[in-house]
Image (cartoon, rainbow, N blue to C red):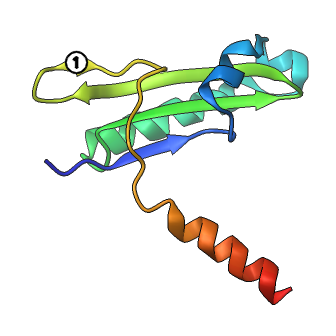
């Protein structure tokens, strides 16, 4: 089964994200209607069958303002994706190798 998973994270580990304090977006300079664009973009991609699921997170100044899970963790078993589900992200060595090469180049 072909799965494409888009994960929009602000580079937090799961344990760190759970320790962040939740805040209303406006209290830290983020507009709620702008955050709703994330939801609509993910839902549109899911409707177009471009992605199966996604977990999105936005944090600023140590405050968590957006953290949602979309779609199914297992389409065949109709299991809903949770925010803390673990899934594989393939080919992560490419960006790490590219950064290392750029550091050496500099």
Q: Quadrant of residue 12?
A: top right
Identify the residue shown where x is 41% and y is 30%.
86
How far from the left and from the top, in percent, is residue 85?
Answer: 41, 23
Front residue of 18/37: it is: 18
From the viewer's perspective, tell me whether residue 6 is left or right of residue 11: left
Front residue of 100/5: it is: 100
Whether residue 75 is situated above or below residue 25 in the rendered picture:
below
Q: Quadrant of residue 72?
A: top left
Identify the secondary structure beneath mark 1. strand
Q: Quadrant of the C terminus?
A: bottom right
Identify the residue shown where x is 84% and y is 18%.
26
Check the image and name the residue furthest to the left.
76
From the viewer's perspective, tell me whether residue 15 is left or right of residue 85: right
Q: Quadrant of residue 8?
A: top right
Front residue of 23/99: it is: 99
Check the image and name the residue furthest to the bottom.
105
Please rate how many residues cluster around mark 1, counting C-alpha atoms within 10 Å: few if below 14, some from 14 to 19, many from 20.
few
Q: Which residue is mark 1?
A: 79
How many callouts does the rendering have?
A: 1
How far from the left and from the top, in percent, is residue 34?
Answer: 68, 33
How far from the left and from the top, in percent, is residue 59?
Answer: 75, 28
Identify the residue shown where x is 48% and y is 20%.
84
Whether residue 1 is situated above or below residue 64 in the rendered picture:
below
Whether residue 32 is situated above or below residue 3 in the rendered picture:
above
From the viewer's perspective, tell me whether residue 10 is left or right of residue 85: right
Identify the residue shown where x is 50% and y is 30%.
39
């Amino acid at each position: 089964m072909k799965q494409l998973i888009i994960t929009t994270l602000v580079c937090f580990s799961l344990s760190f994200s759970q320790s962040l304090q939740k805040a209303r977006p406006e209290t830290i300079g983020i507009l709620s209607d702008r955050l709703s664009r994330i939801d609509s973009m993910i839902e549109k991609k899911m409707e177009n069958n471009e992605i199966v699921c996604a977990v999105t997170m936005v944090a600023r100044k140590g405050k968590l303002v957006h953290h949602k899970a979309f779609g199914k963790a297992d389409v065949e078993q109709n299991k809903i994706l949770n925010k803390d589900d673990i899934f594989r992200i393939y080919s992560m060595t490419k960006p790490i190798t590219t950064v290392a090469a750029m550091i050496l180049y500099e």
